[in-house]
Image: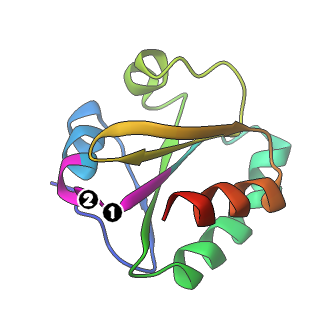
Amino acid sequence: MVKPTAGEVVVLETKDDFDAFLKEAASTLVVVDFYADWCGPCKLIAPKITAMAVEFSGKAYFAKVNVDENSEVAEIEGISAMPTFKLYKNGKKVDELTGANETKLREKIVSNI
C-alpha cells in the first residue's frame, strides 16, 4: 500500500493506491498531479512540484498519477487535459487547476492548507 510521505511526490499506480493515499492523508491537504510522459508542460512543472513537496512538507502531501498508466483513476476523476492538479481533503476534492501554472497552483495550495 502506498502511504503519504512528507516532502516526497508519491506515484499512485492503481485506483487502490489512489484511494488508500487519500484515506491515509485524512484531513491533510493532498495535491495530485495528473500528468503524461509525453506532455511538455508536465515535464516543465515536475521539478517545481518536487520542490513544493519539500516546501510544504508537514502541511500537504503530493502525489502523481500517470494518466496513460492509471487510466482508471484519470477517467473517474474526469481528466481531459494535462497537467491537471486536484486538491483533496478528507477524500473530497476541494480545488483544481488545469495547466502548468506554478503561481496559481501555489496560491491554491496556500489557501487550502
Q: Which residue is mark 2?
A: 25
Q: How is the image coloured?
A: rainbow
42 or 25, nearer to the observer:
25
17 or 109, nearer to the observer:
109
Image quadrant of residue 52?
A: bottom right
Question: Can you say which quadrant of the picture contains the N terminus?
Answer: bottom left
Q: Which residue is mark 1?
A: 28
In the drawing, does residue 23 fall left or right of residue 106? left
> Could you tell me residue 4's position as x and y percent?
29, 65
Q: Is residue 60 above or below residue 93?
A: below
24 or 73, nearer to the observer:
24
Does the magenta-highlighted stretch encompass residue 27? yes
**Secondary structure of the residue carrying numbered label 1:** loop
Residues rendered magenta in the picture: 23-31
Image quadrant of residue 17?
A: top left
> Could you tell me residue 25's position as x and y percent?
26, 59
Does the magenta-highlighted stretch encompass residue 47? no
> Could you tell me residue 38's position as x and y percent?
75, 37
Q: Amino acid at mark 2?
A: Ala
Of circles 2 and 1, the one toward us is 1
Disc number placed over residue 93 in the picture, else none? none
Q: Can residue 35 be seen in the rendering of this structure?
A: no
Q: Is residue 112 above or below residue 81?
A: below
Q: Amino acid at mark 1?
A: Thr
> Could you tell me residue 61's position as x and y percent?
41, 65
Residue at (27% x, 58% y) in the render: 27
| Residue most extreme to the left | 1
Q: Can residue 106 be seen in the rendering of this structure?
A: yes
**Secondary structure of the residue carrying numbered label 2:** helix
Residue at (42% x, 30% y) in the render: 70
Residue at (47% x, 32% y) in the render: 69
Q: Do the numbered discs 2 and 1 sit on residues whose CB atoms are within 8 Å?
A: yes
